[in-house]
Image (spheres, helix red, strand yellow):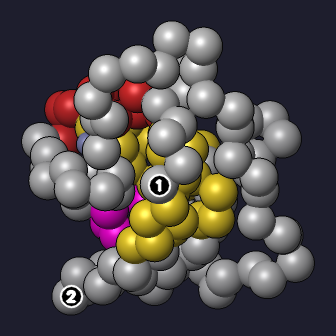
C-alpha cells in the first residue's frame, strides 16, 4: 500500500515521512478487509483525528481515490493516485461493496475543523 500511498491520503495533508505513516483501514478491521480498496496510508496525526471521529472515509477504492466526510459535514472527494514507475498496480476495484455512511460527529466537536 505504501507503494501507492507515499504520502498521507487525508485531504490537504502532505506528510510523507515514512516513519509517521500508518496503515489505516477505511472501514475498521475486522469488518473491513486488509485490501488495497480498504486500506491507505495516513500520517499519525490524521490517523488519530480519524480514529477520534473528526473525519471518516465513506468510500475508499483500490485506485487510491477516497471520499471523506468531516464531523462538520464537509464532503471531500480525492482523485485516484498514480502508481509510481516500477511499482505494481493495485488490485482491481470492487464495486460490490457499497459506500459506508459517515460516523456521527464526536460529542466534543467545537473548534476549527482539522481538515
Ligand atoms: Zn496526514
Q: Residues within 10 Å of mark 2 (few under 14, many from 20)?
A: few
Residue 90 or 7: which is nearer the viewer?
7
Q: Residues within 10 Å of mark 1 (few under 14, many from 20)?
A: few
Q: Position of residue 49 (x, y in %)?
A: 40, 27
Give the labeled residue for mark 2: 85
Residue sitting at the far top? 108
Dominant secondary-structure state across the stretch colored magenta: loop
Image: 92 above or below 111: below
Q: Which stretch did the figure color magenta?
A: 1-5
What's the residue at 52%, 37% (across, down)? 71
Mark 1: which secondary structure?
loop
Q: Which corner quadrant of the image does residue 92 belong to?
A: bottom right
Give the labeled residue for mark 1: 74
Mark 2: which secondary structure?
loop
Which circle's residue, 2 or 1, is located before the other in the chain?
A: 1
Ligand 1 within 8 Å of disc 2? The answer is no
Residue 20 or 99: which is nearer the viewer?
99
Count the labels in the image: 2
Is residue 9 in sight in this rendering? Answer: yes
Residue 101 among those drawn in magenta: no
Q: Which corner quadrant of the image does residue 29 belong to?
A: top right
Left or right, residue 86 beside residue 79: left
Amino acid at each position: 500500500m505504501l507503494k501507492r500511498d507515499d504520502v498521507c491520503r487525508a485531504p490537504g495533508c502532505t506528510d510523507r515521512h515514512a516513519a509517521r505513516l500508518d496503515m489505516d483501514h477505511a472501514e475498521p478491521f475486522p469488518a473491513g478487509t486488509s485490501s488495497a480498496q480498504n486500506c491507505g496510508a495516513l500520517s499519525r496525526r490524521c490517523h488519530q483525528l480519524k480514529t477520534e471521529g473528526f473525519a471518516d472515509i465513506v468510500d475508499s477504492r483500490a485506485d487510491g481515490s477516497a471520499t471523506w466526510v468531516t464531523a462538520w459535514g464537509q464532503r471531500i472527494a480525492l482523485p485516484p493516485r498514480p502508481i509510481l514507475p516500477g511499482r505494481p498496480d493495485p488490485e482491481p476495484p470492487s464495486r460490490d461493496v457499497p459506500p459506508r455512511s459517515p460516523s456521527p460527529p464526536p460529542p466534543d466537536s467545537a473548534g476549527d475543523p482539522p481538515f
